[in-house]
């Protein structure tokens, strides 16, 4: 699926510089950044969900450990 990504001049320059240093296209670098962001936030969401479920379950033990 095609999309248009509008960047500021500074963002474009930074992307162009990074792509040139890596010998890759700007598109490849931008797509990799999107993939990494999605993977990172998906993991964070899973961790947050697990913590929301488990912390109340072990609240008393955690409180006592903190004493």
Image (cartoon, helix red, strand yellow):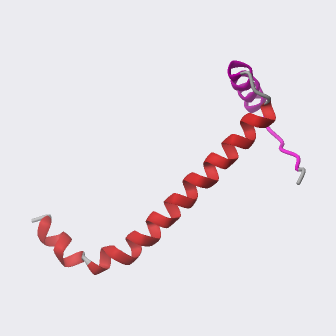
Q: Could you say where residue 7 lies in the image, as x and y percent from the top left?
A: 79, 38
Q: In the figure, 63 relative to 44: above or below?
A: below
Q: In the figure, 48 relative to 27: above or below?
A: below
Q: Quadrant of residue 28 in the image?
A: top right
Q: Residue at x 69, y 47 (%)?
A: 34
Q: Could you say where residue 30 lies in the image, as x and y percent from the top left?
A: 74, 39
Q: Could you say where residue 61 lies in the image, as x and y percent from the top left?
A: 17, 74
Residue interval drawn in magenta? 3-22
**Residue 55 horizontal side relative to residue 31, left or right:** left
The residue sitting at the top extreme is 21
**Residue 64 horizontal side relative to residue 48, left or right:** left
Q: Quadrant of residue 59 in the image?
A: bottom left
Q: Residue at x 25, y 76 (%)?
A: 58
The residue sitting at the bottom extreme is 57
Q: Nearer the viewer, residue 67 or 24?
A: 24
The residue sitting at the left extreme is 67
Q: Work out which quarter of the rendered image holds the N terminus and state it.
A: bottom right
**Residue 34 horizontal side relative to residue 54, left or right:** right
Q: Residue at x 39, y 77 (%)?
A: 53
Q: What number of labels is visible?
A: 0
Q: Nearer the viewer, residue 60 or 34?
A: 34
Q: Residue at x 20, y 70 (%)?
A: 62
Q: Is residue 4 magenta?
A: yes
**Residue 50 horizontal side relative to residue 4, left or right:** left
Q: Quadrant of residue 67 in the image?
A: bottom left
What secondary structure prevails in the magenta region? helix
Q: Is residue 43 magenta?
A: no
């Amino acid at each position: 699926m095609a999309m248009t990504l509008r960047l500021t001049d500074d963002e474009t320059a930074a992307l162009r510089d990074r792509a040139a240093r890596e010998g890759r296209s700007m598109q490849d670098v931008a797509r990799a950044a999107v993939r990494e962001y999605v993977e990172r936030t998906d993991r964070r969401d899973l961790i947050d969900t697990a913590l929301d479920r488990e912390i109340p379950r072990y609240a008393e033990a955690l409180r006592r450990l903190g004493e």
